[in-house]
Amino acid sequence: MIQRFIILGILKKHPATGYDIKKFITKELGLFSQLETRSIYYPLQKMEKEGFVERKEVPQARLRKYTYCITSRGEREFSRLAKEALLSERRPFIEIDIPLYFLSFLNKEEVLPLLRLRMRFLREAENWLLTKRQELKSSPRNIQLLIGHHLGLVATERTFLKEMFDTVKQQKFDPPPEKA
């Protein structure tokens, strides 16, 4: 769903090649979405068959190159997907939640350096977001909201990681349950 929504959103801005779509997703949305871009052409072909996008050949000397543009049916699908995403009741899921559940099985000497690395990543992400916010200070309000949202998420995650680090360091968690 989200891949289709992103691709249609990019094509709402302007027609683009598959390569341009992949590049935009990686460069512009990489921090905000974990969308895999290995195969962008399969979803484009599928959406073309469903009538959401049109493919047009670009006249070129050596290579066959295509651009994709959104159709009126694709416009309606984009709107539907936006509403579905805005009304989603799925709760956020962060990969750290699963190791946290099994924390009592993990060796603190192995976990602590990993938590330090994660904290460093979050500091780098925060610095990147602050730089991006400064670079884009005259950008549309929706971009400012997006960056602000992620700054809030990073701040919350850093606070949580500090608590988790202290807990692991002091081993203030229950031991693993006894095997039956």
Image (cartoon, rainbow, N blue to C red):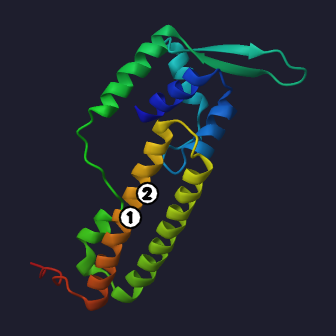
Q: Amino acid at mark 2?
A: Leu
Please identify the quarter of the rendering in which residue 131 is found: bottom right
Q: Amino acid at mark 1?
A: Ala
Q: Secondary structure at mark 2?
A: helix
Residue at 59% x, 43% y is: 28
Residue at 47% x, 37% y is: 141
Q: How far is disc 1 from disc 2 in space, using C-alphas?
A: 6 Å
In the image, is 17 to the left or to the right of 62? left
Please identify the quarter of the rendering in which residue 77 is found: top left
Residue at the outermost right position: 61
Q: Position of residue 113 (x, y in %)?
A: 45, 83
Q: In the figure, 124 relative to 143: above or below?
A: below
Query: Is label 1 in contact with label 2 (beta carbons under 8 Å)?
Result: yes
In the image, is 123 to the left or to the right of 167? right
For mark 1, does the 10 Å Cα neighbourhood hold few (<14), some (14 to 19), or many (20 or more) residues? some
In the image, is 166 to the left or to the right of 68? left
Q: In the figure, 77 relative to 123: above or below?
A: above
For mark 2, does the 10 Å Cα neighbourhood hold few (<14), some (14 to 19), or many (20 or more) residues? many
Q: Position of residue 18 (x, y in %)?
A: 65, 29
* Residue 120 appears in view: yes
Residue at the outermost top position: 72
Q: Secondary structure at mark 1?
A: helix
Q: Which mark is residue 115?
A: none
Q: Position of residue 78 (x, y in %)?
A: 43, 21
Q: Which residue is mark 1?
A: 155
Q: Which residue is mark 2?
A: 151
Residue at 9% x, 78% y is: 180
Q: In the figure, 16 relative to 116: above or below?
A: above
**Relative depth, front residue between 157 and 96:** 157
